[in-house]
Image: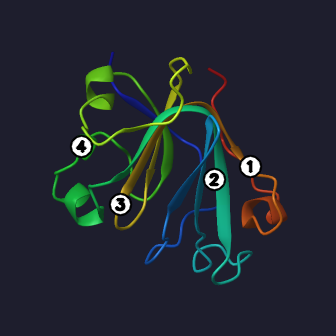
Amino acid sequence: MRTQFFQLNMGWNAEPNAPQPAVQVQGDDLLLSFYVNPYLYSEFKEDETATLRFVRCLRYRLGSPDDEGWHRGQCRFSKLAPDWGEFYIVKGDNTLLNAPQDWKQVCGHCGLGRHFLFYFRDETFECVAESCEIEPVEGNSLQRIGKKLNLPLS
């Protein structure tokens, strides 16, 4: 099956210069926080953060490639993904999913989930989880503005 990418971030994105993504494991879930882009999306203020919750996260990775590696074709998705810097669900070839060796296990009893991929400036975030949602906490700029994830039905 050919690899397909479904973009989840419409009307928002990570800060392009220093998004500083950070992960935090909470039980079987994983929280991903990062600075949002106030330059392209004026509804965000400078130094505002967003937090996404990956529900029943099987595993994740935060590492290479960075934007330069992606543009040089050093990423397994360089020739496939529509754009650098976006947040996707990836469907298709599982050999591409399993290629990196730096996955960190979160939930040992969680089943297979969806493959989430977010390209930040200096690193790539990937996660296999049941679902993703905007974390409903005070200070989450995505919630404050009422942004949504563009999740495909299946």
As measured in the structure, the alpha-carbon distance from the residue carrying label 2 to the one carrying label 1 is: 8 Å
Q: Which mark is residue 148?
A: 1
As measured in the structure, the alpha-carbon distance from the residue carrying label 2 to the one carrying label 4 is: 22 Å
**Tag 2 and tag 1, C-beta contact below 8 Å:** yes
For disc 2, the marked residue is 10
Among numbered discs 2 and 3, the one appearing first in the sequence: 2
Q: Secondary structure at mark 1?
A: loop
For disc 4, the marked residue is 79
- Is 97 placed above or below 17 here? above
For disc 3, the marked residue is 123
Q: Give the amino acid at mark 2.
A: Met
Q: Nearer the viewer, mark 4 or mark 1?
A: 1
Q: Secondary structure at mark 3?
A: loop
Q: Give the amino acid at mark 1.
A: Lys
Badge 1, how many Cα within 10 Å: few under 14, some, many 20+? Answer: some
Among numbered discs 2 and 1, the one appearing first in the sequence: 2
Q: Nearer the viewer, mark 1 or mark 3?
A: 3
Q: Secondary structure at mark 2?
A: loop
Q: How is the image coloured?
A: rainbow
| Residue drawn where x is 29% and y is 28% of the image | 98
29 lies left or right of 135: left
Q: Give the amino acid at mark 4.
A: Lys
- Is 11 placed above or below 42 here? above
